Image (cartoon, rainbow, N blue to C red):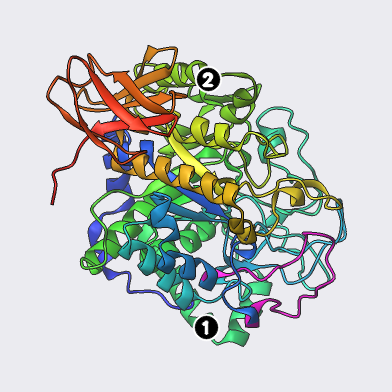
Amino acid sequence: MKRIASLCAALLLCTSACAEKEKAGAADAKVDPFWRNATVYFMLPDRFVNGNPDNDLAYGRGGDADQLRGFHGGDLQGVIDKLNEGYFDQLGVDALWMSPVYEQIHGATDEGTGRTYAYHGYWPKDWTGVDQNFGSEALLAELIETAHSRGIRVLLDVIVNHTGPVTGQDSLWPAEWSRADSVCDWSGFAGTVSCMLVDNLPDIRTESDAPVALPPQLVNKWKAEGRLDQEQAELDAFFERTGYPRAPKYYLVKWATDWVREYGVDGFRVDTVKHVEPEVWRALKQEASLALADWKKRNPDKKLDDRDFFMVGEVYGYGITGGRDYDFGDRQVDFFDYGFDSLINFDIAARAKEEGMESIFSRYSQMLHGGALDGVGVLNYLTSHDDMNSFDRERQRAREAALKLMLAPGAAQIYYGDELARPLTAPGAQGDAQLRSPMNWADLEKAETRELLALWQKLGQFRQAHPAVGAGVHKKLADKPYTFARTLDGEQSVLVAVDVEPGKKSVPVRGVFADGTELQDYYSGQRITVRNGEVRIDSQHDLVLLAPAKEKG
């Protein structure tokens, strides 16, 4: 990387064999309730806030892309500005996940759905530096430190499967590094892994253990930037310490985990997981864990706590109701056994269109507590950057989306603009670009948008204050109004009532909270005491969020 701390501490922490032994001993340990309940905010930095108009078009990129397929100016400075405003605090966000911010291909492609630049971050050119359209390494460091100062963790998006497309400005990597002659046909494991996802998206040969030299593109680039000797010295130290062969996958593991060791990144969201041999992910988690431990040892005054490194994977199409394994047809893989603490749950977006809350909540709770997924994490979402079947793309069910996502068992992923009903359809835009419009900040001038944002904020703050919401065991208490409880480790409990009558109301809490318990309704802000197995609330709201009241003062 352009700037990296000494690896000496890492050398003393643990050898690769030691780390693997520790992993094996903790294979049955449950994922931290924090991550099983966390609210994760996902954004494409280019579409969020333009904090610095001076970097809108770097590397000679043009403004000639098709609709929503070029850079729009959003950057790391914009994210920092929103952190400083307290926007994420008010939403109850526990972690920020940004699409990849490292350097992207410079040119554009004219294939498929139109002329497209790498605004989305998934077409890497150099894994060792921040793309100038997004900012700089110094700005990323500032962003992470700012987030940490507010108790918010940062997840970086990691790509190991592919390089960016070939363009007039971006050449194909050597054949020993990548393949560009076969597109996946999804026929079993090999037809999903040892192939390109789509035409002109060169596939890294992650199956190979054969040593390879650095691609000449990177050698020439780093030489011109004056950092070739440093990068080569770091690679020498990495391969000497780990004993890994100089195969493509291990270069990428090194480059990905440098960001952790240098900046204290808390976790990874891993892209295209099922398109890479699962053993690679185990190595990535192992090295990232060592790197975070090293960073925390060197930065005791900056670390949030002693939580381990966290890794969530995108196994496209994986759903919680299918159990732990992903079925390739000729092979089943349990990615939780390969370093992942959590997987993105593709089940809920489709299920939410047809099913009510209780159907979803009870099924998920059974899977996560005593079922096939007992103790692991899942990350629920209803909308995303690449799911054309996202829930309610017309934004006609915005309140329902907030309730189903933020109250579902498991962690919750807010896609930027969910909280403002940002449009997910864009006339004239093609393909997944429709899902990636700029953040609709101007809509906050509308009363209905502010009201929706307030709902998301209250649900987010309730989740953040009470891990039982996402990590606890679900129990339905009543159908009308729909009332349920969540209990974590048999101790911490919350109770939620949905679609209650505005005005004066009584909510039964018997069996959850004892008489005399002082509770707080996190929606209206009222403090009430349990009497005769119920609480009486006078508010104009149709939602009640109950938990033990915090001590005054």
* The label number, if any, that marks residue 227 in the structure image: 1
Q: Which secondary structure, mark 2?
A: helix
Q: Identify the residue under disc 2.
A: 321
Comparing 383 with 423, the one in front is 423
Picture quadrant where residue 511 is located: top left
Q: Is residue 321 visible?
A: yes
Q: Is residue 175 above or below residue 511?
A: below
Give the magenta range. 54-76
Q: Secondary structure at mark 1?
A: loop
Whether residue 67 appears in magenta in the rendering, the answer is: yes
Residue 23 coordinates in the image, percent (x, y) = 31, 39
* Secondary structure mostly seen in the magenta stretch: loop
In the image: residue 443, left or right of residue 458: right
The residue depicted at 24 percent of the width and 54 percent of the height is 305
Compared to 101, does 446 lie above or below?
above
What percent of the width, then of the height, locates residue 267?
41, 52
Report the front residue among 397 and 218: 397
User: Which amino acid type corresponds to the residue marked 2 in the rendered image?
Assistant: Thr
Between marks 1 and 2, how big is the CA–CA gap? Answer: 49 Å
- Give percent across and percent down for residue 303: 26, 62
Is residue 391 covered in magenta?
A: no
Q: On the picture, is 333 further left or further right than 20?
A: right
